[in-house]
Amino acid sequence: MPRIRRHEPEAKWGRIQARRMRVVAAGLALALFGCGVDKAKFIAPQVELVLSGTELAVLEGEQVTFTVALSAQPTAPVLVAVRSSDEAKVAGAPVELEFSPDTFDVPQTVTLAGLVDRDFNNETATITVAAEALEPATLKVSVIECPTLAAQDFWLMFNPNNETSGRRDVHVAGAAGTMVTIAGAPAAPIPAAGILTVDTGLTRIPAPNVVESGKAFQVTASAPVHVFANNYVTSSVDAFTAVPQQLLGTDYRALGFSTSRQSQISVVATEDNTTVTIGTGAAIKLNRGQSYLRTAAVDVTGVRVVSDKPVGVNTGDACISTGAGACDHVEEMLFPVSSWASDFFVPVIPQSQTFRVVAASDGTVVSVDGAGVGLNAGQFYEGSGGGKRVQASMPVEVYIIGMGEVTGNGDPAFILIPGVQNAVAEATFSALAANNENTLVVSMPTAELATLRLDGAAVTPAPTWTAYASGGYSHTRIPVTAGIHKLTASKPFIPIVWGERNFEGYGYVAGYGYPRAACQLP
């Protein structure tokens, strides 16, 4: 009767010992056969890959970690591969791990990097962890964009300038064909030139010290856009960057100047049943889209605007006179305290200037090129000129006051300055009317100056850069034509736009990112 002989091969360090069997018997022909081996059986019948989680979120440009281990002791070393479904979005290291029978339960760490790209979208990738003969394990990774000025939802309003003339223009910059809705009007596409301009008219000028509906308005778009606003009257103009809803907050500090004629603080609510307090005034109740304007003939620098739900805040003055024989409307839309920075470079704009540093916290120490001063909440430091570095022990707000000129072009304007923590690697902006002298003012790392590109090309003629006294940054001024422009570099930079002509001046932030340290992951 035939007999079956079973032979168990030896497994050593992950290599299954192949066997060729030789069978002989008297009077019979020699027989040879090979045998196959189930490798999984020799790793261990119950071994599984164990990950520290199944989902992770990481900020674009930042890193996050997870761990891998085995659920049971293998009989041989196990080599584990780590792969990303899209290495342009998420990259992992190391890409291979090895577990021995002695270290199977010691978790090994994998670092994942959320890679920087040129769009403004949150993205996902899948990390697959696999080993031969084991069931693969997967991890979903969400790459989160820190909020920037590019968005699809905005609330804004204009402060009073001149209620009987001029324009209240909204400039929406984005991809051609993007559908835009402004103040409830029918949606319109962004034209091929990349910018849609709409005059919202004079009927939306707010009255002081009263809750109103229909003065503030919403701008929505089918894809991320940048929004700029131009509050224009002949010989009195300023422009500001619209802060998208994703960047709005609940705590702000107003901008002002010592020669105020009529300071202005306006607030628009983005949610129903919003409570707002301006300075020491009584609480104000607003519903979604309602607004409130407070005016006074005092310097409101540092006045606190606080709410229980996100709001948009504009601040400025009907017309400040700086003592240079000029008076002009000034206006900016504020960034919330939660997005402030602590390291700033104040560039040189094309006219005389001063700057202010506003504190939100008691005990803030402000240093300007090494000279320090202490500030409490709501207090400010004022300095003159530009080309200076401002550092603070706590986040602060910094803005330039363009002083205007008597014999040349330009009038007063406010310009908020992004901090180093707000710097961006890409900025889209709109320079206004063709008869303006429009200037792009840039501060960026000195080591990366050669990488700066304007509308996809090296800047020509080559700009003249001036180094700041410390910090490794330099600044320059670049003339630009009216219309939409795009600025990029290999490392984040700080851009503002300045424009002027006879009796008129304006300035605004061209790029602003939420500080990564303050970004919230889901």
Image: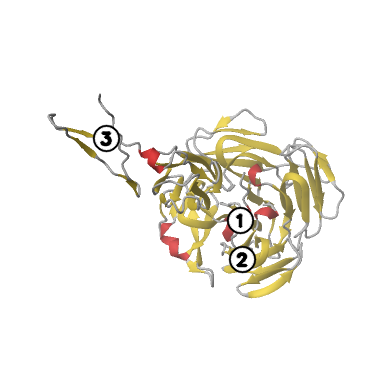
Q: Quadrant of the N terminus?
A: top left
Q: Position of residue 22 (x, y in %)?
A: 19, 37
- Front residue of this view, candidates 105 and 393: 105
Residue furthest out toward the bottom: 371
Q: Which mark is residue 150?
A: none
Quarter of the image for residue 495 reads bottom right
Along the viewing direction, whichever of 144 and 326 lies nearer the viewer:
144
x, y percent for residue 180: 58, 33
Q: Nearer the viewer, mark 2 or mark 1?
A: 1
Q: Secondary structure at mark 2?
A: loop
- Residue at image x 49%, y 45%? 72
Q: Which residue is mark 3?
A: 35
The amino acid at mark 2 is Ser
Q: Between marks 3 and 2, how big is the CA–CA gap?
A: 89 Å
Label 1 sits on what residue type?
Answer: Ala
Q: How far apart in space, not on screen, are marks 1 and 3 (Cα)?
A: 60 Å
Tell me the residue that label 2 is attached to. 352
Mark closer to the chain start, 3 or 2: 3
Instruction: Check whether the beta carbons of the residues at disc 2 and disc 1 lie within 8 A of each other.
Output: no
Q: Position of residue 336 (x, y in %)?
A: 69, 52
Q: Is residue 177 above or below residue 106?
A: above
Q: Residues within 10 Å of mark 3 (few under 14, many from 20)?
A: few
Judging by the rendered image, the residue that carries numbered circle 1 is 517
Q: Residue at x 61, y 65 (%)?
A: 352
Q: Nearer the viewer, mark 1 or mark 3?
A: 3
- Exactly how many numbered labels are in the figure? 3
Q: Give me the residue at 61% from left, 75% from top.
A: 370
Which of pointers 3 and 2 indicates the residue nearer the eye? 3
Q: Are marks 3 and 2 in contact (CB under 8 Å)?
A: no
Q: Earlier in the sequence, mark 1 or mark 3?
A: 3
Residue density around tag 2, few if under 14, some if 14–19, many if 20 or more, within 10 Å: some
| Mark toward the start of the polypeptide (2 vs 1) | 2
